[in-house]
Image: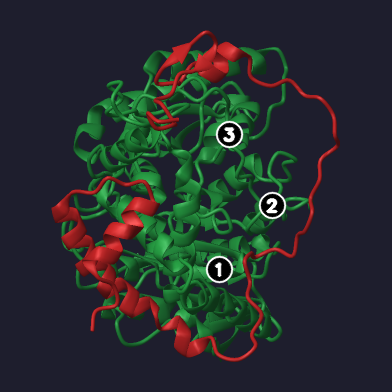
Amino acid sequence: MSAITRDEVAHLARLSRLALHEDELDQLAAQLDVIISAVAKVQEVAQGDIPPSSHALPLTNVYRPDEARPGLDPDQALAGAPAVEDERFRVPRILGEEA
Amino acid sequence: MGAELLRMSASELGAAIRTGETTSAAATEAYLDRIVEVDGEVHAFLHVDREAALEQARAVDARLAEGAEPGPLAGVPVAHKDVFTTKDMPTTAASKILEGWRPPYDATVTTRLREAGLVILGKTNMDEFAMGSSTENSAYGTTRNPWDLSRIPGGSSGGSSAAVAAYEAPLATGTDTGGSIRQPAAVCGLVGAKPTYGGSSRYGLIAFASSLDTPGPFARNVLDAAMLHEAFSGHDPRDSTSVDAPVPPVVEAARRADIEGLRVGVVKELDGEGYQPGVLRRFHETVELLEGLGAKVAEVSCPSFGAALAAYYLIAPSECSSNLARFDAMRYGLRVGDDGTRSAEEVMALTRAEGFGPEVKRRIILGTYALSSGYYDAYYGSAQQVRTLVKRDFDAAFGSVDVLVSPTTPTTAFPIGERADDPMAMYLADLCTIPSNLAGNAALSVPCGLAPEDGLPVGLQIMAPALADDRTYRVGAAVEAALARQNGSDLLSGSAFAV
């Protein structure tokens, strides 16, 4: 049995906002099947009540002083934008026609 | 004079510039000429701005003439990995999605290079978003290994390793998430260090896997690497995971190079089957060499290391799938298909499909899968538990030894194309380096000879506890000095690109 199907890859691509081609879906399904079968090894080792580690350092709640600092001016912030209008980022529509 | 400047170590060059024996402008020009001469073959750089580099160099010369003391590397050129933001140069992370992007701010590492008076020659090639072990995943072409142009220079920081190995720069920066400094250093015959996680700042470093990413140095010798390490490391309030502690005394350790009585553990699990015979031969000879230098060597078992690679290829893709969500075609970078008929979501999906290469897409999908409801516990959750076990193995080992050693990579540089269609085979290049990323401890790769079967460099990996980076430099410098005495020359002088 394969670990991951082509339909699952298509679903994951939608969740990841990746408009993949049909041939990419086929190729990825085959490759991910191999990779997922290999990395499933973690399940053999990680048994019982071992606490998870999300991080290498035992740091929590690092704060900086709440002081105003210089930031980017509008020209700097917009310098790399694909489209700009009236000192703002111009983006494609985010609501459907019926909205 | 040109070749003489190229042959000098970074520390010698820094001293020569300070004493007025030469100038930063002369050294920078020599390296820029060298880049023109060889980079057509090596392809280490994505961006070089000759005039801007010479201008930086003249500015440092002027600062020094006025009596400023920016540091021991003032005026020395450096190659900078294209994953660090630079406001005066494009920053692409070798991705089409950031083609031509000029960041509005400098990374902390960039700022510190400038403050220390280093001259940034240009930006180096890499695997796209630092995902890979060969630079074959760059959207701008593969870098070639100066030892053999048909082979990979390692990755992801392969442009940096190739630049230093081909004498196009005396120093280079890199980032190490699963081995991306140590593996390219090993296969190009260089010194490369992954500092303790949090020891060097991630601010302005384009994120791949934030709990693992660590900036570090490349150099032709241990002392130079230590000097660059010291120049850009240390606490940064702009990075919340930055360690608020002094930089370990790495330069002093590199000068000391004495390992009498040091307890060295050989990791049992990073040896034997699956390793190239010539790599193991040089590794075992070097362990004997350490014993001869007065180290106390013992075998140490780290049973969870066998699952570290699997845990890494769940944790890193999971973090990448989240980090790379920022490339949404709205505020900067590429935008595709915005013809007035498509929604923001459609434009996003088209842009990401066109802007990201195959390996990046593969890891985003894999990470999204591992984090999905229903699979989270079995994959990401289990991987985090393995991470705890790997840390425990290190803690137990460092209870009885001062440093651990292993080969840096299972094989020498492999031919370009050999593993390009087999992701799992490619991932195996990181087998020995990943445990230190998961645990966050310090690690360094130092050349330990050439493999007899192919004449290519082999790296020795030295691992030390978090914030004990100085121990890795101490052992590295001792190995380097002993091998130089034994062989009568340094390793790089045998490369086709030696000057």
Vertical placement of residue B223 versus B182, above or below: above
Q: Which chain is red?
A: A
The residue where tag 3 is placed is: B107
What's the residue at 29%, 77% (across, down)?
Answer: A3
Disc number placed over residue B438 in the picture, else none: 1
Look at label 3 and name its amino acid.
Ala
The chain to which mark 2 is attached is B
Vertical placement of residue B59 versus A67, above or below: above
Q: Secondary structure at mark 3?
A: loop
The residue where tag 2 is placed is: B241
- The x, y position of residue B122, in whole percent, is 41, 28
Q: Secondary structure at mark 2?
A: loop
What's the residue at 60%, 60% (across, down)?
Answer: B473
Quarter of the image with the N terminus of chain B is: top left
- The x, y position of residue A97, in whole percent, is 37, 28
Q: Left of A45 or right of it: where is B336? A: left
Q: Nearer the viewer, residue B386 or B367?
A: B367
Mark 2 Cα-neighbour bin, 10 Å: few <14, some 14–19, many ≥20: many
